[in-house]
Image: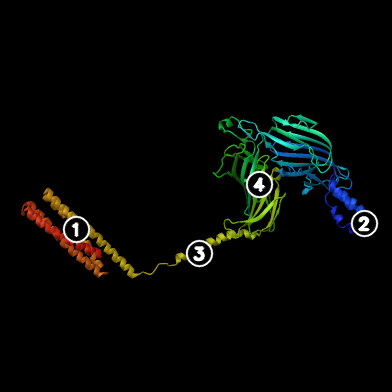
């Protein structure tokens, strides 16, 4: 105890300095150590040597078996590492990724020789090299420890040639480091590159020793390699696996405490393999030409309880899908409207529902939602960008997110749907460069009062109650207005006047009929027909005149002045009717020869003049009405 107190009093910041992670082989770090040692006393040096040994974690890579799997569009590197662990070391192993390919790294995991996952942490950049910390299993009985690190890299394979015709094969180029890129020295490394079945145009045969067996190419062993050693190799080979990528995925999970969780995926997908040039022939495609380099369908795997599955795009429902229920999952085969060749893209919406009790857990007013961060959409899936929205019920509080890996959480949004007042809380999470390894569960914790579930039904009941109450009140109230006698009287008078004027117009038409009867009689000289037509017209005339007289009597009760004007109209009509009768008699006298033709013409002209005068007077009275 006194040794530690003395040391920290004397060296101060130096003790903190050596807590930094120092890896073997970094000469500059040890130069710094030596420069600090000069000013330290003996007790300080004792503790310093202990700190250096512990903090450096001086491991040695005794045996590394590296398998580089490049048979799909995703590159997987499995490194089985056997290390020698010094007695004083039981800390973390630093796994370093080549900075040149770190931007392609999508997922990394570590397991011991029994397959048990090991804790792995991203330490960021150490000496400008991306570094991960792996918890080395502590085995006191054996100084040698074996574990496996699996790294997944995306977009490492480049189509070469970049453009092909429909009938051509797809070839890709891969440049990879055969050595084990590590911060520690390595005694022995063996690397095996597994290519896809097919033609191999080129592989680096100048790196020795090398042995090829079909699609497997084994390099090494390489011995006594220094830290951060590189041995690059290039491969150009046939790779017909689907180079599919989801360029953008918008995933929405909507939670309902009424027993349902709705999941919807809006997927923008692209084939990023060798671009198709030339025309596309559907006939050749049906004959099998181009099947290897294209994608006709994908197979998604959903939870076994998935239901209400739908598959559509901007046009509408896509019927080219097939659902198969298995014991522990539901397989959905999704076929786009057209096969995807290199450079082609498509968009569709894929959704389903699951029972809430399978993913939602409750303890009092505390809830936990545990679901998969992303669905299994297709084999060897790759997602460039993903946005996950988790829609929680209204009035939730104390929302917490536990993600299985590092994600970017954006500010929460508010979604207002049916019967919402304040809106629902929406968690917005973003993640880029996802592969199948990211199909892991997240957990969202929140508080929610069960009484809030009855708020919206109560709102509906209250709304209907108010509606029915309003209808009852409306039915029992009298909203009729008081009668306006003057207005009603005016309307009755106007109706009677309109009817009188209408009858007068009909009578004026009968006047013209009188004239037509006289003209026909003068033309055909048929006395019997003339008498019959005269009686018919006279009957119509009398009927109309009687109606006008009745309306005049009725109108006198309300409007005396108007009734007097109608009386004048009737008197003028009687005079006009008398002139018509004189015209009948004059025409008859002319036909039978009682008067001469010149005398008839003179008398008829006088009658016409009188008729015109009477018509003008009657029109004036009608206008005044």
- Work out how far the residue at label 3 is from the one at label 4, CA to CA, in angstroms: 54 Å
Q: Secondary structure at mark 3?
A: helix
Expressed as whole percent of the image width and height from the top left, the position of residue 330 reads 64, 42
Of the two numbered discs 3 and 4 on the same chain, state the one appearing first in sequence: 4
* Of labels 2 and 1, the one closer to you: 2
Of the two numbered discs 3 and 2 on the same chain, state the one appearing first in sequence: 2
Outermost right residue: 42
- Work out how far the residue at label 3 is from the one at label 2, CA to CA, in angstroms: 88 Å
Which disc, if any, is residue 469? 3
Question: Residue tagged by mark 1?
Answer: 541
**Could you say which is closer to the camera, residue 319 or residue 215?**
215
Q: Residues within 10 Å of mark 4 (few under 14, many from 20)?
A: some
Q: Quadrant location of the N terminus?
A: bottom right
* Of labels 3 and 4, the one closer to you: 4
Using residue 506 as the reference point, say whether residue 202 is left or right of it.
right
**Are the residues tagged 4 and 2 within 8 Å (C-beta)?**
no
Using residue 322 as the reference point, say whether residue 128 is left or right of it.
right
* Of labels 3 and 1, the one closer to you: 1
Q: Quadrant location of the C terminus?
A: bottom left
Question: Residue tagged by mark 4?
Answer: 385
């Amino acid at each position: 105890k006194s040794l530690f107190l003395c040391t920290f009093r004397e060296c101060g910041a130096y003790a903190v300095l050596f807590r930094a992670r120092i890896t073997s082989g970094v000469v500059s770090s040890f130069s710094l150590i030596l420069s600090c040692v000069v000013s330290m006393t003996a007790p300080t040096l004792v503790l310093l040597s202990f700190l250096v040994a512990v903090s450096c974690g001086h491991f040695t890579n005794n045996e590394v078996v590296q398998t580089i799997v490049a048979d799909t569009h995703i590159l997987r590197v499995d490194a089985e590492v056997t290390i020698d662990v010094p007695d004083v070391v039981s800390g973390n192993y630093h796994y370093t990724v080549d900075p040149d390919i770190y931007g392609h790294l999508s997922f990394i995991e570590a397991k011991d020789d029994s397959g048990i996952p090991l804790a792995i942490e991203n330490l960021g950049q150490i000496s400008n090299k991306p570094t991960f910390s792996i918890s080395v299993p502590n085995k006191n009985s054996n100084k040698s420890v074996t574990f496996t690190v699996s790294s997944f890299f995306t977009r490492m394979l480049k189509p070469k040639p970049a453009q092909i015709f429909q009938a051509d094969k797809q070839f890709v180029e891969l440049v990879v480091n055969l050595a084990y890129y590590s911060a520690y020295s390595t005694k022995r490394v063996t690397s095996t590159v597994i290519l896809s079945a097919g033609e191999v145009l080129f592989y680096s045969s100048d790196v020795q020793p090398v042995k090829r067996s079909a699609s497997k190419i084994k390099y090494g062993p390489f011995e006594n390699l220094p830290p951060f050693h590189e041995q690059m190799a290039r491969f150009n080979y046939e790779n017909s696996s689907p180079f599919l990528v989801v360029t953008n995925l918008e995933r929405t999970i909507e939670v309902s405490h009424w027993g349902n969780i709705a999941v919807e995926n809006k997927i923008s997908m692209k084939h990023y393999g060798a671009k198709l040039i030339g025309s596309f022939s559907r006939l050749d495609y049906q004959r099998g030409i181009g099947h290897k380099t294209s994608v006709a369908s994908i197979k998604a795997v959903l939870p076994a309880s998935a239901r209400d599955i739908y598959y559509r795009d901007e046009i509408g429902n896509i019927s080219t899908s097939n659902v198969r229920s298995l014991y522990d999952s539901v397989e959905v085969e999704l076929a786009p409207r057209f096969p995807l060749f290199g450079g082609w893209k498509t968009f569709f919406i894929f959704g389903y529902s699951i029972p809430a009790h399978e993913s939602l857990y409750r303890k009092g007013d505390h809830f936990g939602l545990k679901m998969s961060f992303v669905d299994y959409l297709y084999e060897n899936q790759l997602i460039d960008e993903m946005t996950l929205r988790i829609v929680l019920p209204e009035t939730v509080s104390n929302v917490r997110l536990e993600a299985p890996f590092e994600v970017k959480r954006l500010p929460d949004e508010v979604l207002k749907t049916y019967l919402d007042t304040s809106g629902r809380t929406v968690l917005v999470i973003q993640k880029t460069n996802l592969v199948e390894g990211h199909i892991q569960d997240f957990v969202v914790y929140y508080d929610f009062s069960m009484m809030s579930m009855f708020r919206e039904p109560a709102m509906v009941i209250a709304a209907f109650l108010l509606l029915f109450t309003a209808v009852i009140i409306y039915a029992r109230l009298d909203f009729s207005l008081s009668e306006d006698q003057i207005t009603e009287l005016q309307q009755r008078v106007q109706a009677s006047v309109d009817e009188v004027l209408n009858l007068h117009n009909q009578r004026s038409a009968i006047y013209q009929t009188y004239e037509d009867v006289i003209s026909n009689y003068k033309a055909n000289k048929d006395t019997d027909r003339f008498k019959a037509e005269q009686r018919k017209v006279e009957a119509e005339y009398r009927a109309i005149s009687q109606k006008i007289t009745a309306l005049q009597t009725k109108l006198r009760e309300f409007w005396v002045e108007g009734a007097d004007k109608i009386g004048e109209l009737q008197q003028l009509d009687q005079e006009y009717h008398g002139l018509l009768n004189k015209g009948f008699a004059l025409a008859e006298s002319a036909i039978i020869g009682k008067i001469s033709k010149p005398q008839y013409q003179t008398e008829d002209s006088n009658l016409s003049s009188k008729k015109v005068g009477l018509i003008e007077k009657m029109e004036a009275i009608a206008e005044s009405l």
